[in-house]
Image (tube, grey):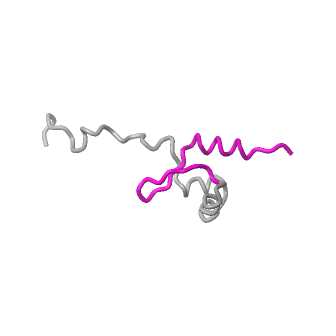
């Protein structure tokens, strides 16, 4: 392909940085120091941060996780 031909998929724009504001299920569990199973249970119980499912991936928006953490804060 010469330099004058567009790259395949170029008409859809770049996906670079698309997931910068998202964290995976595995990474969130690790960051919280809990198992992935515990995070699943929290989701089933309705106590986990909100999430989206994109294909086979479960993703959490970082700002939603921060909001969820703030909501968990309690005075001692």
The image quadrant where one finds the N terminus is top left
Judged left or right of residue 63, residue 71 is: right
Residue located 64% across and 42% down the image: 66
Residue located 28% across and 39% down the image: 12
Residue 51, position as x, y percentages in the image: 54, 50
Q: Which residue is at the front of the view, 43 or 19? A: 43
Residue 52, position as x, y percentages in the image: 50, 51
Residue 22, position as x, y percentages in the image: 51, 45
Q: How many discs mark residues in the rendered view?
A: 0
Asked which quadrant contains residue 9, the reply is top left
Q: Residue furthest right?
A: 76
Magenta stretch: includes residue 73: yes
Asked which quadrant contains residue 30, the reply is bottom right
Magenta stretch: includes residue 16: no
The image quadrant where one finds the C terminus is top right
Residue located 53% across and 48% down the image: 23
Judged left or right of residue 37, residue 54 is: left
Seen in the picture, residue 16 relative to 43 is either above or below; the reply is: above
Magenta segment boundaries in residue numbering: 48-76
């Amino acid at each position: 392909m010469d330099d004058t031909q567009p790259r395949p998929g170029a008409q859809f724009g770049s996906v670079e940085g698309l997931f910068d504001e998202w964290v995976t299920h595995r990474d969130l569990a690790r960051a919280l120091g809990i198992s992935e199973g515990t995070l699943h249970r929290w989701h089933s119980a309705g106590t986990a941060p909100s999430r989206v499912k994109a294909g086979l991936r479960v993703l959490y928006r970082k700002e939603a996780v921060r909001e969820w953490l703030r909501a968990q804060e309690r005075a001692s």
